[in-house]
Every structure is written in structure tokens, then in C-alpha cells.
Amino acid sequence: MNENEKTVEQSKGPTFTDLHFFLGNICDETGLPRQVQVRIRCSNHSNVQALTMFMEEPRVCVYKFTAESVLFCKVLSSIDEFGIPRVSVDDIIEGLLNFVFI
């Protein structure tokens, strides 16, 4: 990461968070539990209806899923050092309504 990217992230807060799930069903090919990393990313698109999703399988039965939307920005701006959102559902809904109708 270059210094410009680091400055942008610090000034705007986190742009994504990763959730890790493991100990899934046993994979027939590896004999190990399936794993998935879910990345929720704040999008810079202004269209509230835009949602980008994609899935990768970097190793057999290990998956990466990414979802990107402007709707995630409010939640991501309130996450603590453990990646837990510290905003109420009511605040999220109010923020979305303000974004859509203002």
C-alpha cells in the first residue's frame, strides 16, 4: 500500500471488512472443512441500487465472496477495532432513507 492510499483510508475510515467462516461441510476433494471469507466493501457508486458481487475459489473448497455497495458505507463507518458495527439498525435505516430521498 502506498502512502496516498493509507492517508485516504485513515481519513475516510475503513472501506471494507472481512468476515471469516470455517469448519463448514467436509470437502470431498480435500477431506478438510470448507472455508469462506466474506468481504463487505463500501462502494463509491452513487446509485443506491447498485450491488456488485463476485466469488472466487483460490484453493479447492476455500472461497472468497465480495459484496460491494454504497449501502455498506454507513455500517463500515461505525465498525470498531474488532470489525463489529457500533451503529443501531434504526440509524442504518435512517441513513439509507436520507441517502435515497435527499
Image: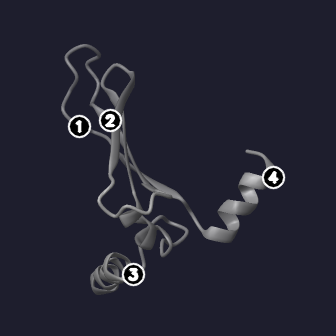
Nearest-to-viewer mark from 2 and 4: 4
Cα–Cα gap, marks 1 and 3: 29 Å
Question: In this rendering, would 92 be left or right of 77?
Answer: left
Q: Residues within 10 Å of mark 4 (few under 14, many from 20)?
A: few
Residue at image mark 1: 24
Q: What amino acid type is highlighted by mark number 2?
A: Gln
Q: Which percent across, then down, holds residue 41?
A: 45, 54
- Tell me the residue that label 4 is attached to: 3
For mark 1, does the 10 Å Cα neighbourhood hold few (<14), some (14 to 19), or many (20 or more) residues?
A: few
Mark sitting earlier along the chain (2/1): 1
Mark 2 and mark 1 in contact? Answer it, CB < 8 Å.
yes
The 10 Å Cα crowd at callout 2, few under 14, some 14 to 19, many 20 or more, is many
Residue 78 picture location, percent across and down: 48, 76
Considering only order in the chain, which callout, 3 or 1, is on the residue closer to the N terminus?
1
Q: Could you give the CA–CA distance between mark 3 and mark 4, rounded to whole angstroms? A: 29 Å
Q: Which residue is mark 2?
A: 35
> Residue 87: which disc?
3
Q: Give amino acid for label 3.
A: Val
The quarter of the picture where residue 30 lies is top left
